[in-house]
Image: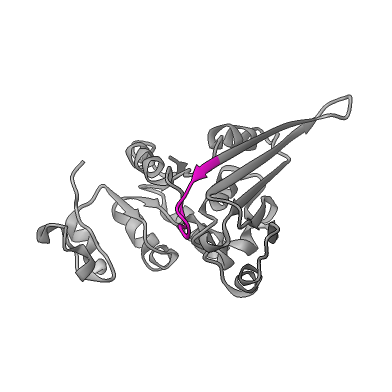
């Protein structure tokens, strides 16, 4: 791999980057002829540039909570006619199996529960108020559809956004998200509950996984996140047009 360009809102933060690799005006991205553009900044980048990026290159969206906006999601799907829109799975365990179930129509329900120390949540609005007053007992900040949660916790629930894309027969409205603030934790815990079809005896196919990712106090992401993202970057190529998990 070779770096085509690096852009940051504050150019002074890029002192360790060679000057010839720094792009000062993101609107000039197409002049660098990148094969893959990777966003690890903010949902506003996808909102402003996502469609344009996909005209010139594959696009790996590090903040997939942006796709909770129905209009933006549809625009990007339509824009991904010549290049691929790649979504890193991150902390979402079992993404390929869940996608297979969604393809078959056998995925009936999906719930993602994220448990973190309150200092690790960068939430907005009413969730921020709840988070300020968390006591010694674990507190549920939110439990409901992922679509409504994404705008309130855009930095924390990219895993849930990825889940909503993988579980495409359910989508952002029917995949359930739950945030739990717990002062006793020094890790990020992600619980994934999958419900499949029922059988003649009335029993349902179910799978539950629990991912424990050690983290620093106040960190939005856990220690294993960077290596996972790097592996996704290596896989973000060669799948052609459309939306792909990586």
Residue 211, above or below 200: below
Front in this rendered view, residue 225 or 89? 225
Instruction: Identify the image quadrant of the C terminus.
Output: top left
> Residue 56: horizontal and vertical position, in percent?
28, 54
Query: The magenta stretch spans which residues?
Result: 212-221
> Residue 115: horizontal and vertical position, in percent?
61, 52
In the shown orientation, is residue 139 left or right of residue 100? right
> Residue 64: horizontal and vertical position, in percent?
48, 55
Q: Quadrant of residue 212?
A: top right
Q: Among all residues in the image, which is located at the extreme top? A: 200
Specify the color scheme. Answer: one colour
> Residue 131: horizontal and vertical position, in percent?
62, 68
Instruction: Count up the numbered dots.
Output: 0
In the shown orientation, is residue 60 left or right of residue 189? left
Front in this rendered view, residue 45 or 132? 132
For the point 43% across and 42% down, the residue is 224
Magenta: main secondary structure: loop
Q: Is residue 31 magenta?
A: no
In the shown orientation, is residue 124 left or right of residue 43? right
Q: Among all residues in the image, which is located at the extreme right? A: 201
Instruction: Identify the image quadrant of the N terminus.
Output: top left
For the point 20% across and 70% down, the residue is 12
Front in this rendered view, residue 215 or 30? 215
């Amino acid at each position: 791999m070779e770096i085509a360009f690096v852009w940051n809102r504050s150019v002074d933060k890029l002192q360790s980057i060679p000057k010839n690799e720094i792009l000062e005006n993101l609107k000039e991205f197409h002049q660098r002829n990148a094969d893959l553009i990777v966003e690890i900044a903010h949902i506003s980048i996808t909102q402003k540039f996502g469609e344009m990026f996909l005209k010139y290159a594959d696009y790996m969206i590090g903040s997939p909570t942006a796709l909770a906006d129905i209009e933006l999601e549809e625009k990007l799907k339509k824009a991904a006619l010549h290049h691929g829109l790649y979504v890193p799975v991150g902390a979402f365990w079992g993404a390929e199996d869940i996608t297979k179930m969604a393809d078959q129509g056998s995925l009936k329900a999906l719930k993602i529960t994220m448990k973190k120390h309150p200092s690790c949540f960068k939430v907005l609005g009413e969730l921020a108020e709840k988070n300020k007053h968390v006591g010694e007992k674990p507190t549920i900040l939110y439990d409901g559809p992922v679509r409504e949660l994404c705008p309130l916790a855009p930095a924390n629930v990219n895993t849930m956004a990825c889940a909503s894309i993988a579980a495409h027969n359910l989508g952002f409205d029917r995949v359930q998200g739950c945030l739990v603030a717990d002062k006793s934790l020094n890790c990020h815990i992600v619980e994934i509950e999958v419900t499949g079809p029922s059988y003649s005896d009335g029993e349902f196919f179910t799978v539950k996984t629990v991912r424990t990712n050690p983290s620093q106090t106040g960190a939005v992401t856990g220690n294993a996140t960077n290596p996972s993202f790097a592996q996704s970057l290596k896989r973000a190529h060669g799948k052609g047009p459309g939306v792909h998990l990586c």
